[in-house]
Structure formats: structure tokens, C-alpha cells
Image (cartoon, rainbow, N blue to C red):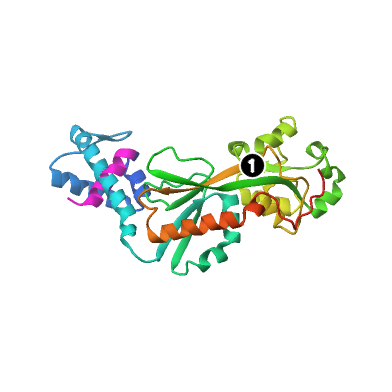
Amino acid sequence: MNWDDLRVFLAVSRDGSLSAAARQLKVSQPTVGRRLGALEDSLSARLFDRQPDGFVLTAAGSELLPMAEAMEQAADAVDRKQAAFADHLSGTVRLSIYEFMAEFVTDHMAALREGLPDIEIELAVAHIGANLSKREADLLIRECLPDTSSLIARKLGRFAYGIYGARDLVARYPMAHGEGRYGACPWISFDDDHTYFAGDKWLREKRNGRGAEIRVNNGMVLHDLVRKGAGLGILPCFAGDGDPGLIRLTAPLDDVHSEHHLIVHQDLRRVPAVRAVMDALIALFRDQADALAGRSNQVTVIGK
């Protein structure tokens, strides 16, 4: 029996069609059909009933399903464990992060890799964290703590946030320096699907429920729009303070901050390359604690 055939069986059982399974597995639809047929031939059993609304498991398919799922879990475990057998610092480490965190990491990537010359780092930027159990990534940096015992979290630090504006925009809107900014100035924030990001609900309360004039679904786009003078915005202090085109109009906002954690699967934490990247990230956050907290001595706050 070929394990690849069982992977096809699992994909079809979950997605209900050959085409959806093919997209998930990144193979052609004929390949999915051929492998499924080979599995049914090897078992001398029909695993699915082909119905107008999709593929439905037969009694034989239902009996096979939990065994195939157990094999999948074992294969995933082997995939995670195999890197731990290495005794040298090399290989690829995949890090899943969201936009503002990506901005922070990329700002320091050159220094981060100085001590990791033989390790390749892949950054996966997305709002939804990768599945570490399925090795979609090796490490996550997220605000949310994991809800499964197989994942281990290490607190990295807190991001402080402030209100920022481009110099020319602040010059055009004197009200930007005080509380009048919430009604008098244009704003940039996240759209309705991303109100959980730091500062968005706080800003809506300040504006009596009114949304920003420009709304986006991406933190880097938000930063770029603020930089280009499209409106005021709430940014992490490390990002705004490091941008010479911006003015910080407030001290770090007491009610707006985010805690971040480094998350790893327990099977990967002792993999040499993964452990080395973890240590480098922990050291980076420790060394940049003042910048993350908005305590940079090179920034003058103009406003209140």
C-alpha cells in the first residue's frame, strides 16, 4: 500500500471532490483519480459512493478513515522529528508572523542572521497562524497563546503603540496635536474584519463609533498610507519611531498594546536550527525592549 494513495483518500474524504483534493495536494485531478482507483484496487473495496453533490464514504471507507488518520498523524510526527536527528546548525526554519511583526523582524534580519550563517529563514506573513502540527511552519509569533498541550509558548515582549502622522499632514492640521484630532483629521485604520487589531476599537470609541476615512486589511499598507500623508494612524512605536517621515503625536497609549509569544511544537524545540533561531529571536526582543516599549531617546513627542 502506498502512503501517497492514503493521503489522496484523506483529502477526498475531507473535501468531497477530486478537484478540491487536487488543489489541496497540488497535483492534477487525473492523478487524484488514478491514485484513489489504485487504493481501491489494492483493498478490493469501493471507498466512496460517487453522488451528484460529491464523494461520500462507503462502509469500507468509513472503516479505513480512522486508520488513515492515525497514519497521517504518525507521518506528521516523523516529519517533525526527522530534523531533530541532525547535529549541526543548518537547514531551513519557517517563521509565521503577521505584518507589523514582519516589519520588526525584517528591520533586524541582517543582524539576526549574523550568528546563523548556514540557516535559511522563510517568513510566512499572514493573519492566520500556520498549523505547527502539520509542519506548515516551525515557529509562530502571535498574540494568542496556544490551546493545545503539544505547543510551547515563550513570552517575547510587549508592543507599545502611539499616534503618528506625516510631517506635512500634521502641518496642515494643527488640531492633530491635541484631542481635537479625532474629529478634525482624516484617519487610517483596519477594516471591519480586522477590528481585533490593537488600537482599532479604541480609535472608534474616541471617534464616537465613527470609522476611519481609509480602512485596510494589512498593517504594512496602513503604515505606508500614514507615511504618505493620507491620514493619522495608530502604529507600533518601533515602526513609527524608526520612520523619519513621521511625527509621534502621543506618548505610548496606555490602553493600546499587544503581548507577543514565540510558539513552537514540542517535537521541534530541540531541533538545532530551530533552537538557534528561537534563541536569536528571544535575544532580539530583549535587546530591543526599549524601542518596542516606545522609550527611544531619539524620539521627540509633539502633541499630547
- Residue indicated by mark 1: 257
- Label 1 crowd bin: few (<14), some (14–19), many (20+), radius 10 Å: some
Report the residue that reaches farthest toward the left: 44
Residue at point 74%, 30% (across, down): 208
**What secondary structure do most residues of the magenta stretch adopt?**
helix
Residue at point 56%, 58% (across, down): 284
Type of the residue with mark 1: His
In the image: residue 263, left or right of residue 5: right
**First to last magenta residue range:** 1-14
> Which of 131 and 90 lies nearest the eye of the viewer?
90
Position of the C terminus, as image quadrant, is top right
Residue 9 visible in the snapshot: yes
Pinpoint residue 278: horizontal percent, then vertical percent: 47, 56
In the image: residue 265, left or right of residue 301: left
Residue 8 visible in the snapshot: no
Residue at point 33%, 63% (across, down): 86
In the image, residue 203 lies in the stretch drawn in magenta = no
